[in-house]
């Protein structure tokens, strides 16, 4: 995941491409709706101090199928979530 050049427009486009509202992304990423809105409204690259939080939101978007690239964002099939088998269960 390379995020150094993601603009607010690309961030918003990824969310919209997935058919999500800002509230959907807020719930899935654990970030506030207001933080997401401020990123989407920014015409500049994301502030470095918010890098960790942005990574979390981008991971959620990418797991759902958004792929950022030099020209914008595309949608691909979602990455399946693999869960470890529960301990103590026998086959």
Image (cartoon, rainbow, N blue to C red):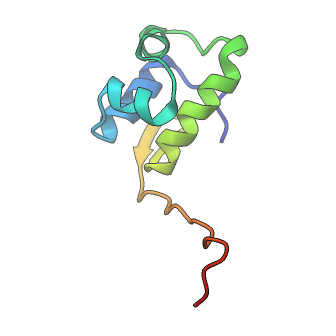
Give the quadrant of residue 90: bottom right
Asked whether residue 30 appears in the rendered view, the answer is yes
Q: Residue sitting at 49 percent across and 13 percent down?
A: 35
Viewer-proximal residue among 49 and 67: 49
What is the x, y in percent for residue 62? 51, 45
- Residue 81 at x, y = what percent? 52, 61
Query: Which residue: 60% across, 33% down?
Result: 56
User: Measured from the top left, where is residue 91 in percent x and y?
Assistant: 58, 91
Dividing the picture into quadrants, the one containing residue 10 is top left
The answer, for residue 5, to whether it is visible in the render is no
Residue 90 vs 87, above or below: the answer is below
> Relative to 2, is 69 on the left or the right?
left
Image point 63% across, 24% down: which residue?
53
46 displayed left or right of 39: right
In the displayed structure, 14 sits above or below 76; it is: above
Residue 31 percent coordinates (x, y): 51, 23
Number of callouts: 0
- Vertical relation: 33 (above or below) 91: above
Relative horizontal placement of residue 36, taking residue 69 as reference (left or right): left
Q: Residue at x 65, y 11 (%)?
A: 47
Q: Residue furthest front?
A: 88
Along the line of sight, which residue is nearer the eye, 6 or 86?
A: 86
In this view, which residue lies farthest toward the bottom?
Answer: 91
Indicate the quadrant containing the N terminus: top left, top right, bottom left or bottom right.
Answer: top right
């Amino acid at each position: 995941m390379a995020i150094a050049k993601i603009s607010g427009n690309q961030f918003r486009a990824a969310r919209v491409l997935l058919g999500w509202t800002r509230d959907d992304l807020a719930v899935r990423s654990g970030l506030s709706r207001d933080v997401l809105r401020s990123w989407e409204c920014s015409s500049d690259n994301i502030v470095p101090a918010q890098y960790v939080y942005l990574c979390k939101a981008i991971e959620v978007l990418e797991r759902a199928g958004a792929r950022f690239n030099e020209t914008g964002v595309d949608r691909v099939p979602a990455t399946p979530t693999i869960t470890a088998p529960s301990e103590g269960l026998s086959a």
